[in-house]
Amino acid sequence: MNKLSILGGLIILAAHIPLFISLYKRQTRLSLATWLLWSIIDTAALVVSIAAGAIAPTMVLAFTIAAWIVFFLVLRTGNWIWKINETISAVVALVSLVLWFSLGSIWALASLVFGKYIAVAVPTYIDAYARPEKFQFYVWGAFAVGALLNIVGLYSVTGSWNVTNFLYPTVGLLGNGLIAVLHFNLQNKKPRAN
């Protein structure tokens, strides 16, 4: 396994630490249902990545570990909320599992990755646009840097591009990068003078 890929995974995991602390101190309230579904989606993406032959799925491993830690911290508060985002997440997870069993690992991986970063993450994109936060720029930026390190590390080991190794980190770089840019751009804009 490449050191850059490992470093990318560690950066992603470390970027979650402020959230872990905030949840532990009960300063942040999140939905238990949402984080259970994120944990399941990330676990499924990890299993499918390994089954498809990914050589260093450190990025998805980091997100899986972080999602389960968040879930167990949120479990302490018992804040169960089920809205449209949770329904979309459940459908994405279910469709991905059906695809995995019926069509194979690559289709399941594709549906999990695109489902996570497109369908399930839409509320996050909207929130980043509507309520940018400087702190969030750093968190999502760290996720994007971790994804980039994963891509560079994987390419230095394999010397070629393939869906199994590069789909999750590439889409992760674009999705996390977009959220970081939305937080950064709007945070630094000044109101127009009339």
Image (cartoon, helix red, strand yellow):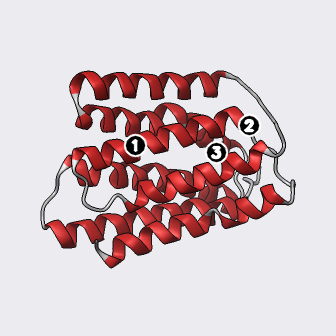
Closer to us: mark 3 or mark 1? 1
Q: Residue 161: image x %, image y %? A: 16, 56
The residue furthest bottom is: 3
Q: Which mark is residue 128?
A: none
Q: Can the viewer see residue 103?
A: yes
Q: CA distance from mark 3 to mark 1?
A: 27 Å
Q: Can the viewer see residue 182?
A: no
Q: Which residue is mark 1?
A: 45
Q: Which residue is mark 3?
A: 129
Q: Residue 65: image x %, image y %? A: 54, 56
Going from the N terminus, do you reach mark 3 or mark 1 first?
1
Viewport quadrant of the N terminus: bottom left
Mark 1: which amino acid? Ala
Mark 2: which amino acid? Ser
Q: Which residue is mark 2?
A: 31
Going from the N terminus, do you reach mark 2 or mark 3 first?
2
Taking the spot 27% from the left edge, 54% from the top edge, the residue there is: 166
